[in-house]
Image (spheres, rainbow, N blue to C red):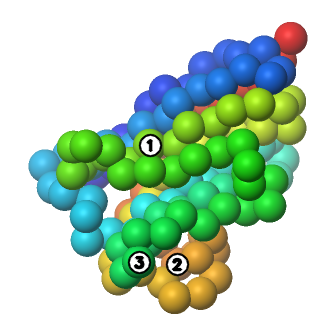
């Protein structure tokens, strides 16, 4: 089971750190993706981190602002979000898949295990 946390209300330009935590198992063998779904929109990929090369991958909307990383605890993956914009407002989900996909890494359909989301609101 995955659990996303860390959401909240933040002003434009602010930062939030989201955490994805697995209960009772390591995430080292899984590619982890962060996704978001805004009201009335489809769920979209934001960032993911691979197991094969450990590299992060980002949607264009997240590049330069968001950073995905594996936590010191093997059951945690974090998403640091900086310079937040109102259009980042959404429910954010983390998801896992093993083995890591080699392409189309932010495709929602590739991920098998999903956590409950955490809500992020960017507003003044």
- Of helix, strand and loop, which one carries label 3? loop
Q: Secondary structure at mark 2?
A: helix
> Could you tell me which residue is drawn at 60 percent across and 42 percent down?
92
Residue 86 visible in the picture = yes
Q: Residues within 10 Å of mark 2 (few under 14, many from 20)?
A: some
Q: Secondary structure at mark 1?
A: strand
* Residue positioned 41% across, 69% down in the render: 54
Taking the image as shown, residue 36 lies to the left or right of residue 38, namely: left
* Dots 1, 2 in contact, CB < 8 A: no
Per the model, the C-alpha gap separating discs 1 and 2 is 20 Å
Q: Is residue 47 left or right of residue 29?
A: right
- Tag on residue 110? 2
At x 60%, y 58%, the residue is 47
How far is disc 3 from disc 2 in space, using C-alphas? 18 Å
Taking depth in this image into account, of 20 and 63 the one nearest to the observer is: 63
Quarter of the C terminus within the rendering: top right
Sequence-earlier tag: 3 or 2: 3
Q: Tell which of 55 and 122 is nearer to you.
A: 55
Q: Is residue 48 left or right of residue 15?
A: left
**Eyeballing the image, is 22 above or below 101?**
above
Residue annotated with mark 1: 78
Is residue 112 visible from the viewing direction of this image? no
Dividing the picture into quadrants, the one containing residue 89 is top right
Specify the label residue 34 is tagged with. Answer: none
Camera-side residue of 116 and 55: 55
**Residue assigned mark 3:** 53
Q: Position of residue 30 (x, y in %)?
A: 32, 69
Please give the name of the residue rendered at 52% of the width and 30% of the height, measured from the top-left corner.
Answer: 17
At label 1, counting other C-alpha atoms closer than 10 Å, the crowd grade (few under 14, some 14-19, many 20 or more) is many
């Amino acid at each position: 089971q995955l659990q996303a946390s860390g959401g909240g209300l933040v002003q434009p330009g602010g930062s939030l750190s989201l955490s994805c935590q697995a209960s009772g198992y390591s995430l080292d063998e899984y590619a982890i993706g962060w996704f978001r779904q805004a009201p009335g929109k489809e769920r979209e990929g934001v960032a993911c981190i691979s197991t094969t090369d450990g590299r992060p991958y980002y949607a264009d909307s997240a590049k330069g602002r968001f950073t995905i990383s594996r936590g010191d605890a093997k059951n945690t993956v974090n998403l640091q979000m900086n310079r937040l914009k109102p259009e980042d407002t959404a429910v954010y989900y983390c998801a896992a898949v093993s083995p890591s996909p080699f392409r189309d890494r932010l495709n929602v359909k590739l991920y098998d295990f999903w956590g409950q989301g955490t809500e992020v609101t960017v507003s003044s």
